[in-house]
Amino acid sequence: MTAPDTRRSEPAPTGPAAPGDREPDDAAAGPARPLPAVPEHAVRPAVEPDDRPTRRHRSRWDALVAAVYLLGALMVTARGWRDVDGRLLGSRPDDQGFNEWMLAYAAHAVRHLENPFFTTAQNAPDGVNLMTNVGMQLPGILLSPVTLLFGAPTAYVLLITLNLAGTGYAWYHVLSRHVVDSRAAAFVGGLFCAFAPALVSHSNGHPHITAQWLVPFIGWRVLVLARDGRVLRDGLVLGALVAAQFFISVEILFLLALGCLMVVLAHLAVAPRVAVRRAPRLAGGLLVAGALVAVVTAYPLWMQFAGPQHRLGHPGGPDVYALKLGSYVRYATESIAGSATSAGGWGPNTTEQASFYGWPLVVLAVAAAWWLRREVTVRVLTLVGVVCALLSIGTTWTWGTERTTVPAPFALVQHLPIFDAVVVARFGLITTVAVGVLLALAGDRVLRTRVENPMLVRVAGVALLAALVPVLPTPLPVQKRPPVPHFVTSGEWRDHVAPGRTLVPVPVANMTSVYWGSAALAEFAVPQGYFLAPVSPTDRTGRWGVEPQPTAKLLTLVAEGRRGVEVTPAEVAQARADARHWRADAVALPRHRRQEQLRAVLDACYGPGRRVDDVWLWDVRPFNR
């Protein structure tokens, strides 16, 4: 079967031809990550005036699409909305805890005009480089009113919900205005890009990954530059969008840039004359955009690559976070056809399930690519999607759920800068968008034949339902949130800890520090935490967290029942030295199953504690003088 010829008897447009045209020189250029090469809105195949939707009809359709996407997002996050302050949404509670703290700190930074890229409010006194972690400054700032009024848990669930709905609608908007005539086809493309297993699995705790609402617009602006855009004006528009995405997620921006490069190379391979002809204009616009981005991001880039607590690489080898080749025909944990065990062994964890399409969707995508193989856009999409799927496998090929010793494509780039810090499974995000746009293109071509070939429309509709329904998401799971003492949530701590000074929770546990700090909107500092940091001041290799202070280790052993309550004079001296190191004003012990033993140790180290609200409190300010 060959691609339908979209050329008509009307006079040929002066701009680039539609992607259905078969001559390579007239084909559209490739997209930015991972938007395909598509024609300008003005040169889409013309429709008769009587068939053109009115503006009111279009607005109603757009509103309906937005409502469907929002309802879908609310369905995915529904269990979290039922008890925002008592439940954690998804299967990765530590990731949610950290991102709630990031939102709390962003609101704190807005309120006090503090540095949004580095803070000592976690991991006191050394601090955390927020740029070398997830960043997310722009969403945090935009949601700061919600965070300040309703708390970080509400802001987090709202962000996860809006990310899904917003990403879907952004893809629908770009596809329906610039890529396809059929709004139904654009709806399907947006639906898949936002609600495929890739973004739904990352909704378990990675809002910086699911916040892709600017990606379609950045991709489209790159295409505008490549065609007939104005170098200065369109370069500045692109630069502003890229700079905004930088403050949403540097990782998604890297994948976006990589997708752009792959599209350029793929287009050079399938339509070299067109690619070479458009290269000068694209290069000029990218230089303008790059100059603007360099100015706007100079300081945060310095912070990320040379600032305090910056790191190199990612903990563990790349294959720890890689997919298996067979995962592309399996079903994800949170898909209708999936289960708690369906993805077991095929992906690294419940958040990194960027593949998991199932056999029906894989077959449908291959069939659509073959049917439209004469379109340059489709060939570019196919090349980019397949390459990224192979990169997501890691450094060695897999057989079933086991790894072989045969090198795979990612082995060629694993030691390159930035690539050494990539979570390999996330290359599947690019493949997901390539498939989503391919579905929109194929759906649009099918619907163009509905008059002369209604049977094809029916068959394609049944095939689409058979492929998409099994991968549609189910509601994310929830689990009970660890309690935070009323002493913290009520603000009682303010009478005992000065702003910016440290409150030490006992036992000194990473996530306890994070939850307490988040509940107080980062108004006090906490020791340790949950973050990525260098191994040591002399070894910048990335690791999770930091080495606990000796007193933190002592209290952990007592809490676990692995040592008694007797402490030596050296341990007492160390406890007071650690209080000075943490810049602590107070040490707080909430309800604990070994509370009496912990109290005995803390009394020996800091003197008698006293009951304040629902915690035992030790004033350690005298030891900081």
Image (cartoon, rainbow, N blue to C red):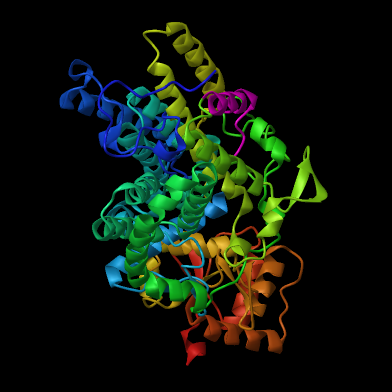
Residue at image x 35%, y 24%?
A: 7
Residue 181 vs 112, above or below: the answer is above
Q: Is residue 183 magenta?
A: no
Q: Which residues are magenta?
A: 355-371
Q: Where is residue 558 shown, x and y percent of the image?
A: 70, 68
Q: Residue furthest bottom?
A: 625
> Can the viewer see residue 575 in this picture?
yes
Residue 324 x %, y %: 71, 42
Considering depth in this image, is 250 or 604 the residue closer to the camera?
250
| Left-right relation of 3 to 288 | right
Quadrant into which the N terminus falls: top right
Where, by quadrant of the figure, is residue 566 drawn? bottom right
Is 309 rendered above or below residue 150? below
Tell me what residue is drawn at x 64 percent, y 30 percent: 339
Q: Nearer the viewer, residue 492 or 338?
A: 338
Residue 449 sits in quarter: top left
Is residue 350 visible in the rendered image? The answer is no
Q: Of 47 and 245, which appears nearest the observer? A: 47
Q: Position of residue 510 (x, y in %)?
A: 58, 64
Q: Nearer the viewer, residue 63 or 531?
A: 63
Q: Residue at x 37, y 29 (%)?
A: 186
Query: 551 left or right of 138?
Result: right
The secondary structure that dominates the magenta segment is helix
Q: Is residue 21 above or below residue 564?
A: above
